[in-house]
Image (spheres, grey):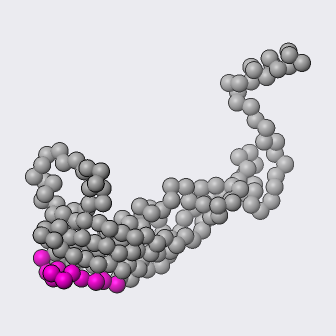
Amino acid sequence: MKIIVSEIPEEGIDLELDEHLRTESVKILSPVHASLRIDKVGSEVLVKGTVDADIELQCSRCLKSFTMHIQSPLNVVYDPAEMISREENYKLASDELDTGFYRQDELDTDELLLEQLLLNIPMKPLCDPECKGICPRCGTDLNVSGCTCETKEIDPRLKVLEQLLKKKE
């Protein structure tokens, strides 16, 4: 949904959105629901609310696909993009990391929602905190069954030290 910044009233806007969004990086399984409060202060646009959706991820331990519900609060300040085009080397300060930019008096809520979902995906998604993963030798899913592979493996760089232990005995 596109919001014309100059048409935001003084009292602000309350929005309830259910958007069908797509991205190449993750499969979104449900409509993205958002409750947003949008206020304008001068040329800045303040967006507060929550975003939630179901997404499909791959477990980083066992490689199985699973569904994860992401619910995220958001609090973003949007400035006009012309503000940074005036300066050659504009650098965001640490207190500006929740700042976005809008162009040509238009704010795209789809981009905002997608950005918030992607920022809240865990770096190493797990299907279950107790996931055992897969055997590095035979590839057996250790959540389903055990394997008989010997897991004692010595780093080849330290193999020489094993000879010292044998000499000591």
Residue at left offset 63%, top offset 58%: 63
The part of the image, by quadrant, that contains residue 72 is bottom left
Q: Is residue 21 visible?
A: no
Picture quadrant where residue 24 is located: bottom left
Is residue 14 rendered magenta in the image? Answer: yes
Q: Quadrant of residue 140?
A: bottom right
The magenta segment is: 6-16
Residue 90: % across, % down: 18, 48
Q: Is residue 148 left or right of residue 137?
A: right
Residue 102 within the segment the image draws in magenta:
no
Residue drawn at (12%, 76%) of the image: 6
Answer left or right for 34 relative to 78.
right
Tell me if 21 is positioned left or right of 84 in this view: right
Single out the residue that lies furthest toward the top. Answer: 167
Q: Does residue 124 show up? A: yes
Q: Residue at x 74, y 19 (%)?
A: 160
Q: Residue at x 46, y 75 (%)?
A: 53
Question: What is the number of callouts on the image?
Answer: 0
Q: Residue furthest right?
A: 169
Q: Nearer the viewer, residue 53 or 96?
A: 96
Q: Position of residue 106 (x, y in %)?
A: 18, 72
Q: Who is closer to the viewer here, 147 or 77?
A: 77
Q: Is residue 108 above or below residue 9?
A: above
